Image (cartoon, rainbow, N blue to C red):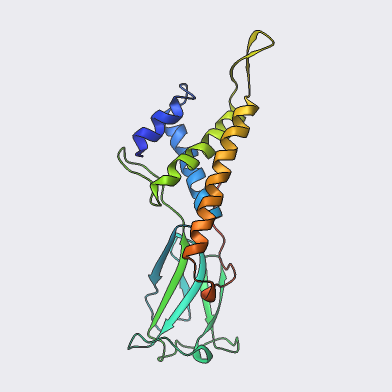
């Protein structure tokens, strides 16, 4: 489903909304969905120098594993790997005992960050979400949940036409969104290698 179709779908419920307002809300739920399910993964290699700290790319939501390799692209033995700490979007490396390094060790030629990615906003008309498109509907449902909780709609209550928030609609669309979250989490768990799991080191940056 493209941006154009997403806007048309949501405007079917809220004709008064403009495209910009719809997509701001949709993109926010899109980021939230990826953060909750951890389904959007990626890898990136650090550009190594003699430095012992590096700025983390802005698309990194949460690092779950770091791989260390030598010049032949072989894994570094666990006892020779570095420890690390993440603070304010910077990763700091230490020796295996947690002591501060003065210079980057020559035995480590490559460092790969395995992470959950923060998706970029959908902007162009024919653009779709970066994850499996089957999750477009749950993300739309999450967006509708927020709009129905915020915007009064025309309803017939006790035979009278009134404008009020439709909490039944909120419950309905929230349920679809939740089901999508569960489905996404299950898929992410199947993809995740449990033997390489590392505790959360960098939280998703979600601006509400």
- In the figure, is residue 2 to the left or right of 204? left
Query: Along the line of sight, which residue is nearer the eye, 161 or 176?
Result: 176
What residue is drawn where x is 56% and y is 45%? 179
Q: Can residue 208 be seen here?
A: no
Q: Quadrant of residue 127?
A: top left
Q: Quadrant of the C terminus?
A: top right
Counting labels gives 0
Position above or below: 30 against 72: above
- In the figure, is residue 30 to the left or right of 45? right
Q: Position of residue 205 (x, y in %)?
A: 54, 55
Query: Along the line of sight, which residue is nearer the eye, 76 or 57?
Result: 76
What residue is drawn where x is 34% and y is 34%? 4
Q: Can residue 44 be seen here?
A: yes
Position above or below: 38 against 30: below
Q: Position of residue 80 (x, y in %)?
A: 50, 91
Residue furthest to the top: 159
What residue is drawn where x is 59% and y is 88%? 99
Q: Position of residue 108 (x, y in %)?
A: 41, 87
What residue is drawn where x is 48% and y is 81%? 52
Position above or below: 29 against 74: above
């Amino acid at each position: 489903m493209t941006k154009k179709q997403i806007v048309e779908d949501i405007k079917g419920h809220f004709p008064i909304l403009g495209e910009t307002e719809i997509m701001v809300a949709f993109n926010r739920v899109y980021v939230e969905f990826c953060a909750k399910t951890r389904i959007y993964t990626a890898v990136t290699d650090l550009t190594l120098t003699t430095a012992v700290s590096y700025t983390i790319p802005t698309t990194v939501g949460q690092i779950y594993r770091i791989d260390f390799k030598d010049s032949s692209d072989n894994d570094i033995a666990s006892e020779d790997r570095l420890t690390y700490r993440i603070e304010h979007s910077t990763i700091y490396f230490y020796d295996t005992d947690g002591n501060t390094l003065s210079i980057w060790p020559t035995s480590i030629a490559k460092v790969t960050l395995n992470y959950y990615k923060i998706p970029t906003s959908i902007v162009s008309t024919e653009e779709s979400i970066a994850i499996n498109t089957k999750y477009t509907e749950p993300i739309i449902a999450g967006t509708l949940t927020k709009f129905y909780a915020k915007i009064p709609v025309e309803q017939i209550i006790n035979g009278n036409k009134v404008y009020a928030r439709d909490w039944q609609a909120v419950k309905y669309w929230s349920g679809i969104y939740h089901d999508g979250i569960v489905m996404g989490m299950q898929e992410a768990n199947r993809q995740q290698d449990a033997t390489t799991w590392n505790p959360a080191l960098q939280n998703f940056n979600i601006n509400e």
